[in-house]
Image (cartoon, rainbow, N blue to C red):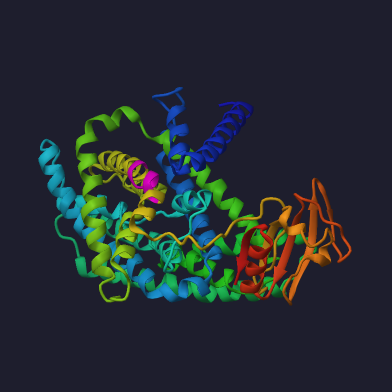
């Protein structure tokens, strides 16, 4: 294909995907579903773009997953996940294993009933279930944030920790089962189990120590161009993934752990780097989703509609709830409704589809059937679970109505994560001016400052004698959250809490 034509098509696909992602927030549908739909629309059964390079798809998927996991580690604050660390780790390890076992047995039974002409072994069924054993909560929280919903009892950090850390375990299960299938009639299960544990251990240790070394080098290296610091962190990420692979560890676990270590450390140009990786992760997700949409042939999904639906429903309604309740059984203080909601938010995303490419690349028997079923089950999960996340949160009673967290919308500014302050965006109303039009007439608590004023498209640093008008937007920071919120209520002003560490 001509280079200019290729770039034109890619730019149009990206633009349509971004627009569809914006529409997904309004409709309450995960953006992933729209991205996949755009890819399928332009694929072989749509406008006729044929993409059948499995090796290239696997390579792109590997790089994309590596960056997405690293970015997820960077964004995970240990202070937030610490109260639910044990629950999250158990769900990401034991939970993934139990899901693969339960779903594998149900999948084997369903395929025997619905596709008797296709002889699928129990090991192959376990492989299919392992591919779908990891969850994806990124699209879930995009819906919750677009609706302005927050969750009680640390459910949000629990789900983010699980979804961010369970992909490595699922990947190891997939690779292990593929190796067992390739061994034929005499697989060495003890050797496979030992390799699994060894990969986990090496990946975790290398991720931690190489992450620490990366932070040290980032702070010691003096680069003439500040914009190169995010590139330096990117270099460390791909280095850690590659080195871990050659040392027989799990690279995906290593980059996630390294992301945790780096993201929770102090280093130069941290905010710039975090923003860079947030955009990079979205770029890779977009590329990955479009590629997967192009890779699938929709007409091949028709014959597996019945088994696909049964496998999807059995995973959503049987395997996932049993796994969550068994895994969280030691945590008796955790409410039943919280566990039920965690069960429902076992959303399948693009990662299972990426894992489903691996059997295709390795020429595993029934690889195309596995890919089509995984793709179909992912679509069902997005449609059933993804569209009902907010509704189920209300139904289970896990919404925190007292939280009013929001992103800055009218004043584009950021604060270092080390600042232990509340930042809030305040819109001045007529009732707030009842004691006088000047800033000094607002009875603000101690240790509270108005640091910026926006009026229309103009900005200024206000003083006590600054005359306020209805509709002005003030950026406030304080060390006393409760006193400031009480003042806002007394003044009758609108506010949005932006950050509290």
Residue at figure coordinates x 63%, y 67% from the top left: 485
Residue at the far top: name it.
47
> Does residue 33 appear left or right of residue 405 in this picture?
left
Residue at figure coordinates x 24%, y 34% from the top left: 305
Residue at figure coordinates x 42%, y 43% from the top left: 55
Residue at the far right: name it.
465
* Res 380 quadrant in image: top left
- The spot of residue 394 in percent (x, y) is 38, 54
Residue at figure coordinates x 62%, y 65% from the top left: 499
Report the front residue among 393 and 216.
393
Provide the residue span drawn in magenta. Answer: 383-389
* Res 447 quadrant in image: bottom right
Report the front residue among 468 and 156.
468
* Res 114 quadrant in image: top left
Q: Can residue 160 be seen from the camera position used here?
A: yes
27, above or below 403, in the image:
above
- The spot of residue 487 in percent (x, y) is 67, 68
379, above or below 405, in the image:
above
The mark total stands at 0
> Does residue 230 appear left or right of residue 102 in this picture?
right
- The spot of residue 6 in percent (x, y) is 58, 30
Chief SS of the magenta region: helix
- The spot of residue 322 in percent (x, y) is 22, 61
Magenta stretch: includes residue 387: yes
Quarter the N terminus occupies: top right
Magenta stretch: includes residue 82: no
């Amino acid at each position: 294909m001509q280079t200019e034509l290729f770039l034109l098509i890619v730019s149009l696909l990206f633009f349509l995907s971004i627009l569809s992602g914006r529409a997904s927030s309004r409709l309450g549908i995960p953006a992933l579903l729209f991205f996949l739909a755009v890819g399928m629309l332009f694929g072989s059964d749509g406008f006729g773009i044929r993409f059948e390079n499995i090796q290239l798809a696997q390579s792109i998927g590997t790089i994309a997953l590596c960056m997405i996991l690293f970015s997820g580690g960077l964004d995970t604050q240990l202070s937030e996940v610490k109260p639910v660390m044990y629950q999250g780790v158990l769900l990401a390890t034991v939970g993934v294993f139990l899901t693969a076992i339960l779903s594998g047995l149900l999948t084997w039974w369903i395929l025997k009933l619905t596709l008797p002409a296709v002889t699928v072994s129990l090991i192959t069924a376990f492989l299919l279930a392992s591919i779908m054993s990891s969850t994806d909560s990124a699209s879930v929280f995009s819906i919750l944030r677009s609706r302005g919903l927050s969750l009680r009892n640390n459910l949000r950090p629990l789900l983010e920790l699980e979804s961010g850390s369970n992909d490595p375990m699922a990947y190891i299960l997939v690779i292990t089962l593929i190796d067992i299938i390739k061994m034929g009639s005499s697989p060495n299960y003890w050797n496979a189990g030992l390799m699994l544990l060894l990969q986990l251990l090496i990946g975790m240790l290398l991720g931690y120590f190489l992450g620490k070394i990366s932070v040290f080098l980032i702070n010691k290296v003096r680069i003439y161009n500040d914009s190169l610091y995010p590139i330096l962190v990117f270099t460390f990420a791909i280095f850690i993934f590659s080195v871990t692979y050659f040392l027989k560890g799990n690279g995906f676990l290593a980059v996630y752990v390294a992301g945790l270590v780096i993201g929770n450390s102090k280093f130069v140009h941290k905010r710039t780097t975090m923003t860079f990786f947030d955009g990079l992760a979205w770029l890779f997700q977009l590329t990955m989703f479009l590629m997967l949409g192009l890779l699938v042939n929709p007409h091949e999904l028709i014959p597996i509609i019945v088994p696909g639906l049964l496998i999807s429903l059995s995973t959503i309604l049987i395997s996932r709830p049993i796994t969550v309740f068994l895994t969280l059984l030691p945590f008796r203080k955790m409410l039943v409704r919280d566990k039920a909601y965690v069960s429902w938010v076992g959303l399948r995303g693009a990662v299972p589809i990426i894992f489903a490419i691996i059997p295709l690349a390795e020429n595993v028997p029934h690889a195309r059937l596995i890919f089509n079923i995984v793709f179909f089950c992912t679509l069902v999960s997005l449609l059933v679970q993804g569209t009902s996340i907010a509704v189920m949160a209300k139904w289970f009673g896990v919404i925190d109505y007292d939280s009013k967290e929001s992103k800055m919308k009218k004043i584009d500014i950021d604060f270092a994560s080390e600042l232990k302050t509340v930042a809030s965006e305040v819109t001045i109303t007529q009732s707030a001016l009842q004691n006088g039009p000047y800033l000094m007439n607002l009875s603000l608590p101690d240790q509270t400052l108005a640091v910026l004023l926006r009026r229309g498209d103009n900005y200024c640093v206000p003083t006590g004698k600054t005359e306020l008008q209805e509709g002005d937007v003030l950026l406030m920071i304080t060390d006393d959250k409760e006193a400031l919120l009480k003042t806002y209520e007394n003044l009758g002003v609108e506010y949005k809490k932006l950050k509290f560490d």
